[in-house]
Amino acid sequence: MSTEDAFVIKGGVPLRGEVQLDGAKNVALKVIVAALLLDSPITFKNIPHLSDIDEQLHLMRELGAKAEFVHDHDVYVDSQSLNSYEVDLLHGSKIRTSFMLFAPLLYRFGKAIIPNPGGCRLGARPIDRHVKLLETFGVHISYDSSTGYYTATLKHTRLQGAEYTFEKPSHTGTELGLMIAAIANGQSTIHNAAQEPEVDDMIRFLNDAGARIRRQGTSIIVDGVDKLAPTAESFTIMADRLNAAAFGVFAVATKGDITVKGLDAHYITDFTEKLIEAGGGFDAEKDALHFYYKGPLKSTDITTVPHPGFNTDTQGPWAILMTQAHGVSTIHETVFENRFGYVDELRKLGAHIEFFQPQVDNPRELYQFTIHSDDEIANLQQAIRITGPSPLHNGVLHATDIRAGASLVIAACAAEGESVILGASHIDRGYEKIEVQLAALGAQIKRV
Protein backbone atom coordinates (compact mmCIF):
# COMPACT_ATOMS: atom_id res chain seq x y z
CA MET A 1 0.00 0.00 0.00
CA SER A 2 1.32 3.43 -0.96
CA THR A 3 1.07 6.55 1.17
CA GLU A 4 -2.26 8.33 1.06
CA ASP A 5 -4.04 5.06 0.31
CA ALA A 6 -6.06 4.86 3.52
CA PHE A 7 -8.84 6.76 5.24
CA VAL A 8 -9.00 7.40 8.96
CA ILE A 9 -12.59 8.00 10.08
CA LYS A 10 -13.93 8.89 13.50
CA GLY A 11 -17.54 7.75 13.37
CA GLY A 12 -20.72 8.28 15.32
CA VAL A 13 -21.35 11.76 13.88
CA PRO A 14 -24.68 12.45 12.08
CA LEU A 15 -23.95 13.70 8.55
CA ARG A 16 -25.91 16.78 7.53
CA GLY A 17 -25.96 19.18 4.60
CA GLU A 18 -26.06 19.23 0.82
CA VAL A 19 -23.97 17.37 -1.74
CA GLN A 20 -23.79 17.93 -5.50
CA LEU A 21 -23.63 14.66 -7.39
CA ASP A 22 -20.76 13.93 -9.74
CA GLY A 23 -21.43 12.74 -13.28
CA ALA A 24 -22.13 9.04 -13.75
CA LYS A 25 -18.92 7.04 -14.05
CA ASN A 26 -20.75 4.30 -15.96
CA VAL A 27 -21.72 6.83 -18.61
CA ALA A 28 -18.45 8.76 -18.70
CA LEU A 29 -16.27 5.73 -19.38
CA LYS A 30 -18.44 4.64 -22.30
CA VAL A 31 -19.20 7.92 -24.09
CA ILE A 32 -15.57 8.99 -24.23
CA VAL A 33 -14.87 5.75 -26.11
CA ALA A 34 -17.92 6.28 -28.34
CA ALA A 35 -16.50 9.73 -29.19
CA LEU A 36 -13.83 7.93 -31.23
CA LEU A 37 -16.60 7.08 -33.70
CA LEU A 38 -17.19 10.76 -34.43
CA ASP A 39 -15.66 12.59 -37.40
CA SER A 40 -15.16 15.79 -35.39
CA PRO A 41 -14.22 16.68 -31.79
CA ILE A 42 -16.59 16.83 -28.82
CA THR A 43 -16.34 18.14 -25.26
CA PHE A 44 -18.09 16.17 -22.51
CA LYS A 45 -19.32 18.01 -19.44
CA ASN A 46 -19.95 16.68 -15.92
CA ILE A 47 -17.24 14.01 -16.24
CA PRO A 48 -16.07 12.87 -12.77
CA HIS A 49 -12.30 13.11 -12.27
CA LEU A 50 -11.64 9.48 -11.29
CA SER A 51 -8.64 7.19 -11.66
CA ASP A 52 -10.60 4.93 -14.04
CA ILE A 53 -11.36 7.92 -16.28
CA ASP A 54 -7.68 8.89 -16.29
CA GLU A 55 -6.76 5.32 -17.30
CA GLN A 56 -9.31 5.37 -20.15
CA LEU A 57 -8.07 8.73 -21.45
CA HIS A 58 -4.47 7.49 -21.28
CA LEU A 59 -5.40 4.44 -23.37
CA MET A 60 -7.00 6.67 -25.99
CA ARG A 61 -3.97 8.96 -26.14
CA GLU A 62 -1.73 5.90 -26.59
CA LEU A 63 -3.81 5.13 -29.69
CA GLY A 64 -3.09 8.62 -31.02
CA ALA A 65 -6.36 10.35 -30.15
CA LYS A 66 -6.61 13.63 -28.28
CA ALA A 67 -8.37 12.87 -25.02
CA GLU A 68 -7.89 14.97 -21.91
CA PHE A 69 -9.47 17.00 -19.15
CA VAL A 70 -9.60 20.63 -20.23
CA HIS A 71 -11.38 21.84 -17.08
CA ASP A 72 -12.18 20.15 -13.76
CA HIS A 73 -15.09 18.16 -15.21
CA ASP A 74 -14.81 18.77 -18.96
CA VAL A 75 -13.15 16.22 -21.24
CA TYR A 76 -12.16 16.96 -24.83
CA VAL A 77 -11.95 14.08 -27.32
CA ASP A 78 -10.80 14.28 -30.94
CA SER A 79 -10.50 11.02 -32.90
CA GLN A 80 -8.95 12.49 -36.05
CA SER A 81 -5.37 11.74 -34.98
CA LEU A 82 -6.14 8.10 -34.06
CA ASN A 83 -3.28 6.07 -35.56
CA SER A 84 -3.08 2.66 -33.85
CA TYR A 85 -5.36 -0.34 -33.46
CA GLU A 86 -3.40 -2.12 -30.69
CA VAL A 87 -4.23 -1.35 -27.06
CA ASP A 88 -1.42 -1.26 -24.52
CA LEU A 89 -1.34 -4.43 -22.39
CA LEU A 90 -0.45 -2.80 -19.07
CA HIS A 91 -3.15 -0.15 -19.11
CA GLY A 92 -5.72 -2.01 -21.20
CA SER A 93 -5.83 -4.92 -18.79
CA LYS A 94 -6.53 -2.58 -15.87
CA ILE A 95 -9.92 -1.35 -17.00
CA ARG A 96 -12.91 -3.29 -18.23
CA THR A 97 -14.18 -0.70 -20.68
CA SER A 98 -11.02 -1.11 -22.78
CA PHE A 99 -12.99 -3.88 -24.53
CA MET A 100 -15.37 -1.25 -25.92
CA LEU A 101 -12.52 0.10 -28.03
CA PHE A 102 -13.27 -2.73 -30.46
CA ALA A 103 -16.07 -0.60 -31.94
CA PRO A 104 -14.10 2.51 -32.95
CA LEU A 105 -10.94 0.60 -33.88
CA LEU A 106 -12.79 -1.80 -36.16
CA TYR A 107 -14.63 1.17 -37.66
CA ARG A 108 -11.43 3.13 -38.28
CA PHE A 109 -8.94 0.37 -39.17
CA GLY A 110 -10.91 -2.83 -39.80
CA LYS A 111 -8.75 -4.46 -37.12
CA ALA A 112 -8.29 -4.28 -33.35
CA ILE A 113 -5.93 -5.95 -30.88
CA ILE A 114 -7.03 -5.59 -27.26
CA PRO A 115 -5.92 -7.35 -24.03
CA ASN A 116 -8.27 -9.23 -21.75
CA PRO A 117 -9.94 -6.41 -19.78
CA GLY A 118 -9.72 -5.77 -16.04
CA GLY A 119 -11.71 -3.71 -13.54
CA CYS A 120 -13.36 -4.82 -10.32
CA ARG A 121 -13.21 -8.59 -9.87
CA LEU A 122 -16.84 -9.22 -8.98
CA GLY A 123 -16.94 -12.61 -10.65
CA ALA A 124 -16.39 -14.10 -14.08
CA ARG A 125 -18.19 -11.28 -15.96
CA PRO A 126 -17.89 -13.45 -19.08
CA ILE A 127 -16.39 -11.83 -22.16
CA ASP A 128 -17.78 -14.61 -24.34
CA ARG A 129 -21.08 -12.72 -24.65
CA HIS A 130 -19.22 -9.75 -26.10
CA VAL A 131 -17.25 -12.02 -28.43
CA LYS A 132 -20.47 -13.61 -29.77
CA LEU A 133 -21.91 -10.14 -30.28
CA LEU A 134 -18.89 -9.07 -32.35
CA GLU A 135 -19.04 -12.23 -34.45
CA THR A 136 -22.72 -11.61 -35.22
CA PHE A 137 -21.84 -8.21 -36.70
CA GLY A 138 -19.29 -9.70 -39.09
CA VAL A 139 -16.15 -9.74 -36.98
CA HIS A 140 -13.62 -12.56 -36.79
CA ILE A 141 -12.15 -12.64 -33.29
CA SER A 142 -9.58 -14.92 -31.69
CA TYR A 143 -7.83 -15.08 -28.32
CA ASP A 144 -4.17 -15.91 -27.67
CA SER A 145 -3.81 -17.14 -24.08
CA SER A 146 -0.02 -16.86 -24.32
CA THR A 147 -0.20 -13.09 -24.86
CA GLY A 148 -3.55 -12.27 -23.24
CA TYR A 149 -4.73 -10.49 -26.41
CA TYR A 150 -7.90 -10.67 -28.47
CA THR A 151 -7.45 -9.98 -32.19
CA ALA A 152 -10.46 -8.88 -34.23
CA THR A 153 -10.75 -8.29 -37.98
CA LEU A 154 -13.67 -7.47 -40.26
CA LYS A 155 -14.94 -10.26 -42.50
CA HIS A 156 -16.22 -7.63 -44.95
CA THR A 157 -15.19 -4.08 -45.77
CA ARG A 158 -17.62 -2.76 -43.15
CA LEU A 159 -19.41 -3.90 -40.00
CA GLN A 160 -22.68 -5.59 -40.97
CA GLY A 161 -26.07 -4.92 -39.39
CA ALA A 162 -27.35 -7.92 -37.47
CA GLU A 163 -29.93 -9.27 -35.06
CA TYR A 164 -28.53 -10.34 -31.70
CA THR A 165 -30.16 -11.67 -28.54
CA PHE A 166 -28.37 -11.48 -25.20
CA GLU A 167 -28.91 -14.65 -23.19
CA LYS A 168 -28.73 -12.44 -20.08
CA PRO A 169 -29.00 -8.63 -20.20
CA SER A 170 -25.55 -7.06 -20.36
CA HIS A 171 -25.00 -3.37 -19.60
CA THR A 172 -21.59 -3.07 -21.26
CA GLY A 173 -22.52 -5.58 -23.95
CA THR A 174 -25.59 -3.58 -24.94
CA GLU A 175 -23.53 -0.38 -25.20
CA LEU A 176 -20.87 -2.12 -27.29
CA GLY A 177 -23.67 -3.38 -29.54
CA LEU A 178 -25.10 0.13 -29.87
CA MET A 179 -21.74 1.57 -30.92
CA ILE A 180 -21.20 -1.14 -33.52
CA ALA A 181 -24.76 -1.04 -34.87
CA ALA A 182 -24.74 2.75 -35.13
CA ILE A 183 -22.10 2.69 -37.88
CA ALA A 184 -22.87 -0.77 -39.35
CA ASN A 185 -24.29 -1.37 -42.80
CA GLY A 186 -28.08 -1.81 -42.54
CA GLN A 187 -30.51 -2.28 -39.68
CA SER A 188 -29.69 -4.06 -36.42
CA THR A 189 -31.84 -5.27 -33.55
CA ILE A 190 -30.51 -6.02 -30.07
CA HIS A 191 -32.91 -8.20 -28.10
CA ASN A 192 -32.99 -8.57 -24.30
CA ALA A 193 -31.05 -5.32 -24.12
CA ALA A 194 -30.04 -3.71 -20.83
CA GLN A 195 -32.60 -1.21 -19.53
CA GLU A 196 -30.34 0.97 -17.35
CA PRO A 197 -30.64 4.78 -17.59
CA GLU A 198 -26.92 4.90 -18.35
CA VAL A 199 -27.63 2.99 -21.58
CA ASP A 200 -30.27 5.60 -22.43
CA ASP A 201 -27.65 8.32 -21.93
CA MET A 202 -25.40 6.54 -24.43
CA ILE A 203 -28.34 6.37 -26.87
CA ARG A 204 -28.99 10.09 -26.34
CA PHE A 205 -25.34 10.89 -27.11
CA LEU A 206 -25.18 8.73 -30.24
CA ASN A 207 -28.51 10.05 -31.54
CA ASP A 208 -27.31 13.63 -30.99
CA ALA A 209 -24.38 12.72 -33.25
CA GLY A 210 -26.63 11.44 -36.03
CA ALA A 211 -27.27 7.83 -35.05
CA ARG A 212 -30.75 6.37 -35.53
CA ILE A 213 -31.49 4.35 -32.38
CA ARG A 214 -34.82 3.64 -30.70
CA ARG A 215 -36.07 1.36 -27.95
CA GLN A 216 -38.92 -1.04 -28.59
CA GLY A 217 -39.81 -2.87 -25.36
CA THR A 218 -36.77 -4.87 -24.27
CA SER A 219 -35.23 -4.56 -27.75
CA ILE A 220 -33.27 -1.75 -29.34
CA ILE A 221 -33.51 -1.07 -33.09
CA VAL A 222 -30.63 0.69 -34.85
CA ASP A 223 -30.50 1.90 -38.44
CA GLY A 224 -26.82 2.18 -39.30
CA VAL A 225 -25.42 5.41 -40.74
CA ASP A 226 -22.29 6.11 -42.78
CA LYS A 227 -20.76 8.53 -40.30
CA LEU A 228 -21.35 10.26 -36.97
CA ALA A 229 -20.64 13.86 -36.06
CA PRO A 230 -21.80 15.94 -33.07
CA THR A 231 -24.52 18.52 -33.67
CA ALA A 232 -23.28 20.60 -30.71
CA GLU A 233 -19.84 21.37 -29.31
CA SER A 234 -20.56 19.65 -25.99
CA PHE A 235 -22.61 16.90 -24.36
CA THR A 236 -23.51 16.82 -20.65
CA ILE A 237 -23.80 13.35 -19.08
CA MET A 238 -26.29 12.38 -16.36
CA ALA A 239 -25.49 12.42 -12.64
CA ASP A 240 -24.42 9.25 -10.83
CA ARG A 241 -27.54 7.55 -9.44
CA LEU A 242 -25.44 4.91 -7.64
CA ASN A 243 -23.67 7.57 -5.63
CA ALA A 244 -27.04 9.17 -4.86
CA ALA A 245 -28.21 5.96 -3.20
CA ALA A 246 -24.93 5.72 -1.26
CA PHE A 247 -25.40 9.23 0.14
CA GLY A 248 -28.95 8.25 1.08
CA VAL A 249 -27.53 5.47 3.22
CA PHE A 250 -24.89 7.82 4.68
CA ALA A 251 -27.75 10.06 5.84
CA VAL A 252 -29.97 7.41 7.40
CA ALA A 253 -27.23 5.13 8.80
CA THR A 254 -25.57 8.02 10.67
CA LYS A 255 -28.98 9.39 11.82
CA GLY A 256 -28.36 12.48 9.74
CA ASP A 257 -30.02 14.59 7.04
CA ILE A 258 -28.58 14.98 3.52
CA THR A 259 -29.96 16.62 0.38
CA VAL A 260 -28.47 15.17 -2.80
CA LYS A 261 -28.60 17.62 -5.70
CA GLY A 262 -28.53 16.98 -9.44
CA LEU A 263 -30.76 13.93 -9.93
CA ASP A 264 -34.46 13.31 -10.42
CA ALA A 265 -36.11 10.77 -8.11
CA HIS A 266 -37.30 8.44 -10.89
CA TYR A 267 -33.73 7.27 -11.48
CA ILE A 268 -33.52 5.46 -8.12
CA THR A 269 -37.05 4.32 -7.30
CA ASP A 270 -35.70 0.79 -6.72
CA PHE A 271 -33.74 2.23 -3.78
CA THR A 272 -36.16 4.84 -2.42
CA GLU A 273 -39.12 2.45 -2.33
CA LYS A 274 -37.13 0.05 -0.16
CA LEU A 275 -35.80 2.90 1.99
CA ILE A 276 -39.35 4.03 2.75
CA GLU A 277 -40.35 0.42 3.49
CA ALA A 278 -37.47 0.22 5.97
CA GLY A 279 -38.61 3.39 7.72
CA GLY A 280 -36.01 5.76 6.32
CA GLY A 281 -36.90 9.35 5.51
CA PHE A 282 -37.12 10.44 1.89
CA ASP A 283 -38.63 13.38 0.03
CA ALA A 284 -38.38 14.01 -3.70
CA GLU A 285 -37.62 17.60 -4.58
CA LYS A 286 -37.04 19.32 -7.92
CA ASP A 287 -33.76 17.91 -9.25
CA ALA A 288 -32.84 16.90 -5.70
CA LEU A 289 -33.32 14.05 -3.21
CA HIS A 290 -33.77 14.59 0.52
CA PHE A 291 -32.71 11.69 2.79
CA TYR A 292 -33.00 11.73 6.57
CA TYR A 293 -33.31 9.56 9.66
CA LYS A 294 -36.76 9.68 11.21
CA GLY A 295 -36.84 6.75 13.62
CA PRO A 296 -36.03 3.06 14.16
CA LEU A 297 -35.52 1.03 10.99
CA LYS A 298 -37.32 -2.18 10.02
CA SER A 299 -35.77 -5.25 8.43
CA THR A 300 -36.24 -5.90 4.71
CA ASP A 301 -35.65 -8.60 2.11
CA ILE A 302 -34.15 -7.66 -1.24
CA THR A 303 -33.05 -9.48 -4.37
CA THR A 304 -30.71 -7.73 -6.78
CA VAL A 305 -31.74 -7.94 -10.43
CA PRO A 306 -31.06 -5.94 -13.60
CA HIS A 307 -32.76 -2.56 -13.95
CA PRO A 308 -35.47 -1.59 -13.05
CA GLY A 309 -35.02 -3.91 -10.07
CA PHE A 310 -32.83 -3.35 -7.00
CA ASN A 311 -29.35 -2.44 -8.21
CA THR A 312 -26.47 -4.77 -7.39
CA ASP A 313 -24.19 -1.76 -6.82
CA THR A 314 -26.45 -0.62 -3.98
CA GLN A 315 -26.62 -3.87 -2.02
CA GLY A 316 -23.36 -3.20 -0.12
CA PRO A 317 -24.53 0.13 1.30
CA TRP A 318 -27.95 -1.45 1.95
CA ALA A 319 -26.32 -4.16 4.05
CA ILE A 320 -24.82 -1.46 6.29
CA LEU A 321 -28.24 0.08 6.75
CA MET A 322 -29.78 -3.27 7.65
CA THR A 323 -27.23 -3.82 10.44
CA GLN A 324 -29.12 -0.98 12.14
CA ALA A 325 -32.62 -2.32 11.40
CA HIS A 326 -34.74 -4.27 13.88
CA GLY A 327 -35.15 -7.91 12.90
CA VAL A 328 -33.61 -10.20 10.31
CA SER A 329 -32.93 -8.86 6.81
CA THR A 330 -31.84 -10.80 3.74
CA ILE A 331 -29.99 -9.83 0.57
CA HIS A 332 -30.03 -12.24 -2.37
CA GLU A 333 -27.45 -11.35 -5.04
CA THR A 334 -28.35 -12.66 -8.52
CA VAL A 335 -26.21 -10.43 -10.77
CA PHE A 336 -22.62 -11.24 -9.70
CA GLU A 337 -21.28 -14.33 -7.98
CA ASN A 338 -18.71 -12.51 -5.86
CA ARG A 339 -20.34 -9.36 -4.49
CA PHE A 340 -20.10 -9.93 -0.74
CA GLY A 341 -16.43 -9.04 -0.26
CA TYR A 342 -17.39 -6.55 2.45
CA VAL A 343 -19.07 -9.09 4.77
CA ASP A 344 -15.98 -10.22 6.67
CA GLU A 345 -14.98 -6.59 7.11
CA LEU A 346 -18.38 -5.68 8.58
CA ARG A 347 -18.12 -8.58 11.01
CA LYS A 348 -14.95 -6.94 12.36
CA LEU A 349 -17.13 -3.99 13.37
CA GLY A 350 -19.65 -6.15 15.21
CA ALA A 351 -22.18 -6.83 12.44
CA HIS A 352 -24.12 -10.11 12.69
CA ILE A 353 -24.14 -11.53 9.16
CA GLU A 354 -24.25 -15.11 7.90
CA PHE A 355 -24.24 -16.60 4.42
CA PHE A 356 -26.94 -18.89 3.09
CA GLN A 357 -28.29 -20.15 -0.22
CA PRO A 358 -31.98 -19.57 -1.01
CA GLN A 359 -33.98 -22.33 -2.65
CA VAL A 360 -33.86 -21.60 -6.39
CA ASP A 361 -35.79 -23.70 -8.90
CA ASN A 362 -33.62 -22.86 -11.92
CA PRO A 363 -30.34 -21.21 -10.88
CA ARG A 364 -28.94 -21.15 -14.43
CA GLU A 365 -31.92 -19.06 -15.51
CA LEU A 366 -32.14 -16.82 -12.43
CA TYR A 367 -28.49 -15.88 -11.99
CA GLN A 368 -27.04 -13.40 -14.46
CA PHE A 369 -23.56 -14.93 -14.29
CA THR A 370 -22.59 -18.10 -16.11
CA ILE A 371 -22.84 -21.38 -14.18
CA HIS A 372 -20.67 -24.08 -15.73
CA SER A 373 -21.43 -27.17 -13.65
CA ASP A 374 -23.74 -28.79 -11.11
CA ASP A 375 -20.87 -28.62 -8.60
CA GLU A 376 -20.98 -24.83 -8.85
CA ILE A 377 -24.71 -24.90 -8.13
CA ALA A 378 -24.13 -27.10 -5.09
CA ASN A 379 -21.59 -24.62 -3.69
CA LEU A 380 -23.56 -21.43 -4.27
CA GLN A 381 -23.75 -18.96 -1.37
CA GLN A 382 -25.56 -16.07 -2.99
CA ALA A 383 -27.35 -14.54 -0.03
CA ILE A 384 -26.69 -13.09 3.40
CA ARG A 385 -28.84 -12.87 6.52
CA ILE A 386 -28.33 -9.76 8.67
CA THR A 387 -29.57 -9.66 12.27
CA GLY A 388 -29.98 -6.21 13.78
CA PRO A 389 -29.75 -3.74 15.20
CA SER A 390 -26.04 -4.18 15.93
CA PRO A 391 -24.00 -1.38 17.51
CA LEU A 392 -20.98 -0.97 15.22
CA HIS A 393 -17.55 -0.24 16.67
CA ASN A 394 -14.23 0.82 15.18
CA GLY A 395 -11.81 -1.43 13.29
CA VAL A 396 -9.17 -1.74 10.60
CA LEU A 397 -10.80 -2.56 7.26
CA HIS A 398 -9.69 -3.45 3.73
CA ALA A 399 -11.47 -2.10 0.63
CA THR A 400 -11.44 -4.59 -2.27
CA ASP A 401 -13.55 -2.83 -4.92
CA ILE A 402 -15.41 0.43 -5.51
CA ARG A 403 -18.82 -0.30 -4.02
CA ALA A 404 -17.57 -2.54 -1.21
CA GLY A 405 -15.08 0.19 -0.33
CA ALA A 406 -17.80 2.83 -0.24
CA SER A 407 -19.86 0.51 1.97
CA LEU A 408 -17.01 0.33 4.46
CA VAL A 409 -16.77 4.13 4.53
CA ILE A 410 -20.49 4.27 5.40
CA ALA A 411 -19.98 1.66 8.12
CA ALA A 412 -17.02 3.57 9.60
CA CYS A 413 -19.04 6.80 9.64
CA ALA A 414 -21.89 5.03 11.44
CA ALA A 415 -19.64 3.17 13.91
CA GLU A 416 -18.40 4.50 17.24
CA GLY A 417 -14.67 5.19 17.49
CA GLU A 418 -11.87 5.62 14.99
CA SER A 419 -11.57 3.24 12.03
CA VAL A 420 -8.96 2.83 9.33
CA ILE A 421 -9.88 1.80 5.78
CA LEU A 422 -6.96 0.51 3.72
CA GLY A 423 -7.13 0.58 -0.08
CA ALA A 424 -8.63 4.04 -0.57
CA SER A 425 -7.52 3.91 -4.21
CA HIS A 426 -10.27 1.36 -4.90
CA ILE A 427 -12.85 3.88 -3.70
CA ASP A 428 -11.21 6.63 -5.77
CA ARG A 429 -12.16 4.68 -8.89
CA GLY A 430 -15.83 5.48 -8.30
CA TYR A 431 -15.94 8.55 -6.04
CA GLU A 432 -14.18 11.84 -6.65
CA LYS A 433 -12.57 13.14 -3.45
CA ILE A 434 -15.12 11.41 -1.26
CA GLU A 435 -13.32 12.54 1.87
CA VAL A 436 -13.86 16.18 0.86
CA GLN A 437 -17.56 15.61 0.19
CA LEU A 438 -18.04 13.82 3.51
CA ALA A 439 -16.06 16.39 5.49
CA ALA A 440 -18.40 19.06 4.14
CA LEU A 441 -21.27 17.03 5.63
CA GLY A 442 -19.60 16.92 9.04
CA ALA A 443 -17.67 13.64 8.82
CA GLN A 444 -14.38 13.39 10.68
CA ILE A 445 -12.36 11.83 7.88
CA LYS A 446 -8.84 12.26 6.56
CA ARG A 447 -6.66 10.56 3.97
CA VAL A 448 -3.31 9.20 5.18
Image (cartoon, rainbow, N blue to C red):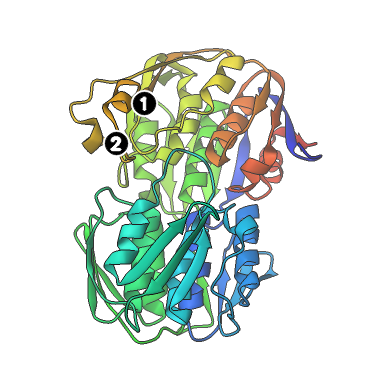
Distance from label 2 to label 1 (Cα)? Answer: 9 Å
Q: Quadrant of residue 219?
A: bottom left
Residue at the image position 36 percent from the left and 71 percent from the top:
180
Nearer-N-terminus badge (2/1): 2
- State which quarter of the image contains the C terminus: top right
Using the image, tell me which numbered label, if any, was put on residue 382: 1
Residue 110: horizontal and vertical position, in percent? 43, 78
- The crowd level at tag 2 (other Cα within 10 Å; few <14, some 14-19, many 20+) is some
Residue 122: horizontal and vertical position, in percent? 47, 38
Depth check: 237 or 428 in front? 428
Circle 2 — which element? loop
Q: Are marks 2 and 1 in contact (CB under 8 Å)?
A: yes
Compared with residue 292, is residue 195 higher up or lower down, i.e. above or below?
below
Compared with residue 97, is residue 168 higher up or lower down, i.e. above or below?
above
- Image check: 48 left or right of 304? right
Residue 368: horizontal and vertical position, in percent? 31, 41
Res 262 visible: no
- The crowd level at tag 1 (other Cα within 10 Å; few <14, some 14-19, many 20+) is many
Q: Which amino acid does label 2 sit on?
A: Tyr
Res 316 visible: yes
In the picture of the structure, the residue carrying the numbered disc 2 is: 367
Residue at the image position 46 percent from the left and 49 percent from the top:
241
Depth check: 7 or 341 in front? 341
- Counting labels gives 2
Compared with residue 334, is residue 397 higher up or lower down, i.e. above or below?
above
- Image check: 223 left or right of 281? left
